[in-house]
Image (tube, rainbow, N blue to C red):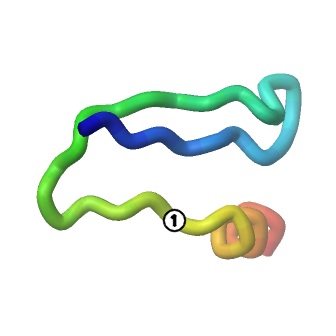
Amino acid sequence: MKQEIRIIGGKYRGKKLHFPAIEGLRPTTDRVRETLFNW
C-alpha cells in the first residue's frame, strides 16, 4: 500500500508525494507541519 503526503505551501502547494508504506512510519498532519515550519 502506498502512502502520500500533500505539499501545503509554496510553489508546489497542493502537489502530492507518494512513498512506500514503511512499518512504524506515519505522515505528520497538515496542521502540525504548518506549525512546525512557521515557528
Q: Quadrant of the C terminus?
A: bottom right
Q: Going by the image, does 3 lie left or right of 15?
A: left
Q: For label 1, count other residues whose C-alpha is less than 10 Å away and answer few (under 14), some (14-19) or many (20+).
A: few
Identify the residue shown where x is 26% and y is 60%. Answer: 25
Callout 1: SS = loop
**Figure quadrant of residue 29:** bottom right
For label 1, the residue is 28
Identify the residue shown where x is 79% and y is 34%. Answer: 14
Give the camera-side residue of 10 and 21. Answer: 21
Compared with 6, 37 (above or below) is: below
**Figure quadrant of residue 1:** top left
Q: Going by the image, does 3 lie left or right of 39?
A: left
- Tally of marks: 1
Could you tell me the amino acid type at mark 1?
Thr
* Residue 3 locus on image (x, y percent): 38, 42
Give the camera-side residue of 36 and 30. Answer: 30
Identify the residue shown where x is 71% and y is 27%. Answer: 15
* Residue 36 locus on image (x, y percent): 68, 71
